């Protein structure tokens, strides 16, 4: 089945009691039992809820996995993965990680004795150099936020298998519409569902998908024990969002391409980061593992100052200045002062997050209008 068809039908069965075509919002915390232990598969909504389960199945199917788990946020989903580790275990990750992930790793889990290595993952040797007997997890984000670096998932999976470690991929930017990490050798796929999967900037949620049964048992045990689950209403909203994921991603890709080219030719723009350019250092890998280049584009200004960036950031009308990404409406952000403010200036500049860097989350509006908006703001 093709992805667009799957996106509409995955995980959803007509409701068994009424035939409702849309999964109802089971807004309930508990379920009546006929006798102790005699129930219809649900006991308590932290452990399981029919609306959430429908969504978990849908996301699992879209990612070519078997088992899905949804959480109260993307961070809660990442937290579940790190809780699979023990003190003394080591993790290798990329050096331009999403700021919140970097903060969780370094400010919380280092304190519990997990060791993290951050390396430029475009360079396979730098990853191999950190592998040792304690390596238990390789954490990949691709494309990365906000520099749009591309990491070779298949190559990482080979390194992880050789090390006896798990490979987890944060697939938030690409979504399963453009990239399916489990089919490229990953063990775990993670999503900030808040972004493209939800797609309408109205829900905060996270998800994990795995293929392996034993790994899924560990995942569900932590989901239930730690309890960072999402509610049925939010699950319903995301089930609705998923139905248009394929068609939304197509439009995000079309707009992303047009705007990346517009920016590249603009006299005030210095660098443009978009994996669709042949000049992008990992363009070949992007072409190999993605079926489109997405709607995220970052760029810097020739006048590399916060003041110059601020002029652009406050000069647009269609692009709204806000954190987050992946919604139908276009947003722009300033990583140095917003999403990446928790990363020390020295660290962030090493990875390219300079003062004038602007990140666009390009929505599904008409590209012509969006380009017009940017033209005016840049002028
Ligand atoms: C937003 C985001 C997260 C965190 O997800 P939340 O839903 O905000 O908790 C993790 N990774 C990436 C790439 C993100 O963009």
Image (cartoon, rainbow, N blue to C red):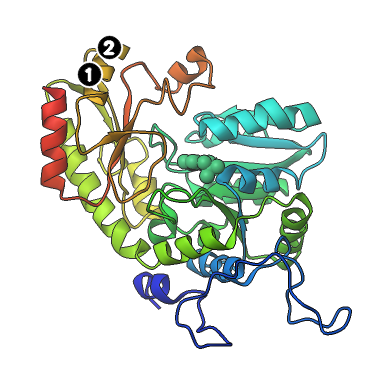
Image location of residue 150, percent across then percent down? 42, 41
Q: Classify 10 Å Cα crowding around label 2: few (below 14), some (14-19), many (20 and above).
A: few
Q: Quadrant of residue 216?
A: bottom right
Q: Quadrant of residue 310?
A: top left
- As helix, strand or loop, the secondary structure at mark 1 comes to helix
| Residue to which mark 1 is pinned | 311
At horizontal 83% and vertical 83% (from top left) the residue drawn is: 38
Near-viewer residue (348 or 133): 348
Q: 101 left or right of 306? A: right
Q: 21 left or right of 244? A: right
At horizontal 20% and vertical 39% (from top left) the residue drawn is: 318
Look at the image and tell me whether residue 4 can be seen: yes
Q: Are marks 1 and 2 in contact (CB under 8 Å)?
A: yes
Image location of residue 370, percent across then percent down? 16, 41
Look at the image and tell me whether residue 94 can be seen: no
Residues at marks 1 and 2, CA–CA distance in whole angstroms: 6 Å
Seen in the picture, residue 229 relative to 246 is either above or below; the reply is: above
Looking at the image, how many numbered discs can be counted on the residues?
2
| Residue to which mark 2 is pinned | 307
CB of residue at label 2: within 8 Å of ligand 1?
A: no
Q: Classify 10 Å Cα crowding around label 1: few (below 14), some (14-19), many (20 and above).
A: few
- As helix, strand or loop, the secondary structure at mark 2 comes to helix
At horizontal 79% and vertical 53% (from top left) the residue drawn is: 225
């Amino acid at each position: 089945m093709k992805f667009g068809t799957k996106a509409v039908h995955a995980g959803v069965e007509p409701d068994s009691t009424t035939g409702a075509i849309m999964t109802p919002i089971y807004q309930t915390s508990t379920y009546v039992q006929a006798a102790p232990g005699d129930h219809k598969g649900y006991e308590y909504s932290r452990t399981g809820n029919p609306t959430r389960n429908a969504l978990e199945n849908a996301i699992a199917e879209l990612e070519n996995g078997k088992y899905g788990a949804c959480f109260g946020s993307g961070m809660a989903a990442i937290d579940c993965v790190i809780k699979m580790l023990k003190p003394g275990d080591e993790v290798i990750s990329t050096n331009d990680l999403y700021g919140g992930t970097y903060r969780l790793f370094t400010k919380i889990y280092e304190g519990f004795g997990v060791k993290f290595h951050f390396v430029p993952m475009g360079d396979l040797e730098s990853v191999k150099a950190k592998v040792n007997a304690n390596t238990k997890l390789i954490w990949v984000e691709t494309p990365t936020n906000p520099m749009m670096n591309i990491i070779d998932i298949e190559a990482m999976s080979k390194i992880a298998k050789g090390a006896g470690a798990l490979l987890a991929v944060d697939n938030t930017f690409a979504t399963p519409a453009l990239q399916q990490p489990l089919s490229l050798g990953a063990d775990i796929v993670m999503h900030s569902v808040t972004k493209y999967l939800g797609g309408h900037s109205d829900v905060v949620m996270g998800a994990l998908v795995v293929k392996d049964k034993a790994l899924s048992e560990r995942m569900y045990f932590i989901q239930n024990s730690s309890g960072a689950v999402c509610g049925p209403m939010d699950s319903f909203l995301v089930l609705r969002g998923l139905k248009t994921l394929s068609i939304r991603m197509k439009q995000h890709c079309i707009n992303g391409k047009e705007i990346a080219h517009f920016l590249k030719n603009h006299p005030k723009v210095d660098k443009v980061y978009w994996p669709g350019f042949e000049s992008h250092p990992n363009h070949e890998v992007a072409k190999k593992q993605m079926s489109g280049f997405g709607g995220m584009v970052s760029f810097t200004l020739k006048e590399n100052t916060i003041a110059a960036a601020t002029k652009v950031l406050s000069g647009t009308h269609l692009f709204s200045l806000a954190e987050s990404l992946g919604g139908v409406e276009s947003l722009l952000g300033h990583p140095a002062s917003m999403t990446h403010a928790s990363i020390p200036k020295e660290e962030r500049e090493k990875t390219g997050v300079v003062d004038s860097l602007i990140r666009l989350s390009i929505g599904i509006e008409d590209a012509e209008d969006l380009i017009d908006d940017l033209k005016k703001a840049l002028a």
